[in-house]
Image (cartoon, helix red, strand yellow):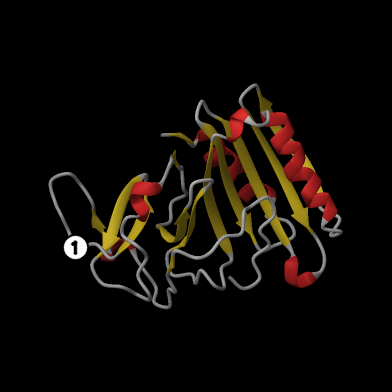
Amino acid sequence: MNGVVRFGLYVVSILCFANLQAEITPDMLIKVTKDNNPDCVEYYSYKDDMYCTTTAQGVPVDPAIKDKETQHIIFDERPWQAAWGQMTDTITTIEYIPAGEDINNWHELITSQFLPGLQNKMTLEQYSQNIMGELQKTGLNPVIKIIDTKPDSILFEFQILDPENLRQDELQKIVQGKDGFYVLHYTIKKPDMGQENRDKWIKNIQSSSIK
């Protein structure tokens, strides 16, 4: 995925991805419920509910991607599409983009990850310190700020200011569960997401939870 800086992520082979070229509006979406069974091709999260389309705007993702999500994610007022995902024995990753963006040229990205069994190998503090240590090793001089810590979770922000093609601002929450670590990222390709946007996504990420 062009221009993606995957700090703290495990880089693995692509299972499925979607390129969105057309604008997706809420009126184009079908709400997925237990009572209906639409022939869904692409899945979206909108106003805390699952929606879908029955025609693909690009290359469709694996429909089973919706069943791999391990977190209840609080998005904003826009529809977000599950645009890429993969599952292995060591990690499950699902990436979401605002409807209408291109996963290969995204501006905003939400990434959900589950790392089963890792809590038996290291503590939350050790894992988070490893992530921050790897950030420092990149030589990009990231600006790292701890936003919130609890016994079972940590929320921090890091900013990459230079070079221009790698500028990004990311919020990352790590939660230690009974069966593994759960990680939730919000990333924007700007050196500073701005305080209003930061406050919004801190609230959304903190309100998100393990399923």
Q: Amino acid at mark 1?
A: Asp
**SS type, badge 1:** loop
**Horizontal and vertical percent position of residue 99:** 42, 64
> Who is closer to the viewer here, 179 or 81?
179
**Horizontal and vertical percent position of residue 98:** 47, 61
Q: Quadrant of residue 64?
A: bottom left
Q: Quadrant of the C terminus?
A: top left
Q: Quadrant of residue 166?
A: bottom right
**Horizontal and vertical percent position of residue 197:** 61, 50
Q: Which residue is mark 1?
A: 39
Q: Does 176 sit left or right of 7 as displayed?
A: left
Q: Quadrant of residue 60?
A: bottom left
Q: Does 79 sit left or right of 39 as displayed?
A: right
Residue at the spot 49% in from the left edge and 46% down from the top edge: 89
**Horizontal and vertical percent position of residue 85:** 46, 58
Residue furthest to the top in view is 151
Instruction: Report how many numbered discs are placed on residues in the image.
Output: 1
